[in-house]
Image (cartoon, helix red, strand yellow):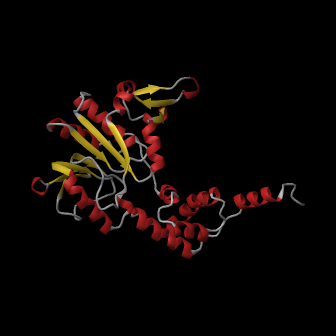
Amino acid sequence: MTSSLPPGQTSVLLQMTQRLALSDAHFRRICQLIYQRAGIVLADHKRDMVYNRLVRRLRALGLDDFGRYLSMLEANQNSAEWQAFINALTTNLTAFFREAHHFPILAEHARRRHGEYRVWSAAASTGEEPYSIAITLADALGMAPGRWKVFASDIDTEVLEKARSGIYRLSELKTLSPQQLQRYFMRGTGPHEGLVRVRQELANYVEFSSVNLLEKQYNVPGPFDAIFCRNVMIYFDKTTQEDILRRFVPLLKPDGLLFAGHSENFSNLVREFSLRGQTVYALSKDKA
């Protein structure tokens, strides 16, 4: 049976349906490049994930070979495709009030501090974490101008765009109380039914920016009373974890808090932090 499609469309169809080969050498190059650019360590069992995510980039660019794609990246270190490469390989699992035990600790800490209370969400993803922080601080401190501020960052520029929009499915806000939902979100109507948007009054307290944690210096408005760096260190090797934690030290105020993910343990990495609670660390006053 012969194809009735024009030759050009036939080749495009074949490119979309055939499985491209990802050789061991190309996979190793991908692992090296994402480690160099973002500090992410990819294990062998991530190979299928890497293939499924990057093959979309190849097809979007009209490429049919991973080697050509990698050579294109390496030929131009300032190419915009580098950001697309990083975006494709970063993992963004998050939820409102994830690891809920952190937020009462944050509220109590904020009530005891003086001046503007500042928090950095260092792996903000699609915004659920920084908005959860903002809701916690608004409930604890009120919304007087200059009372508190949240700075939120991520290496992935695509998720930051979603975070800035502040639009979520109503079903994603099950961990909020009815009072919080009414106070801090607007419900969509008509074609937007089932969606909610963060009210501008709350969004004004949250600032988003792209930050790569591998950078030697962070362009962030510190010092902070608290830093949330949760469920991101697990993607870095031990040396990178230590480097990042040491860069956090001058960015925290005395007795500032560092919130980690449920599977992360920083106790034996740097001496400047001591365990304060479940995956919560405090900066020693003499280390600030």
Task: Write the residue at 41% across / 67% down.
Answer: 36
Whether 92 is drawn above or below 136: the answer is: below
Task: Write the residue at 43% across / 34% down.
Answer: 173
Q: Quadrant of the C terminus?
A: bottom left
Using residue 278 as the reference point, say whether residue 21 is left or right of it. Answer: right
Using residue 47 as the reference point, say whether residue 275 is left or right of it. Answer: left
Q: Quadrant of residue 17?
A: bottom right
Using residue 107 as the reference point, say whether residue 44 is left or right of it. Answer: right
Name the spot of residue 274 as percent of width and height, x first: 17, 56
Task: Write the residue at 31% across / 43% down.
Answer: 151
The extreme left residue here reads 286
Query: Is residue 160 or residue 226 the one in the foreground?
Result: 160
Name the spot of residue 41 as percent of width and height, x first: 42, 66
One can see residue 41 in this view = no
Name the spot of residue 33 as percent of width and height, x first: 46, 68
Task: Write the residue at 71% across / 63% down.
Answer: 18
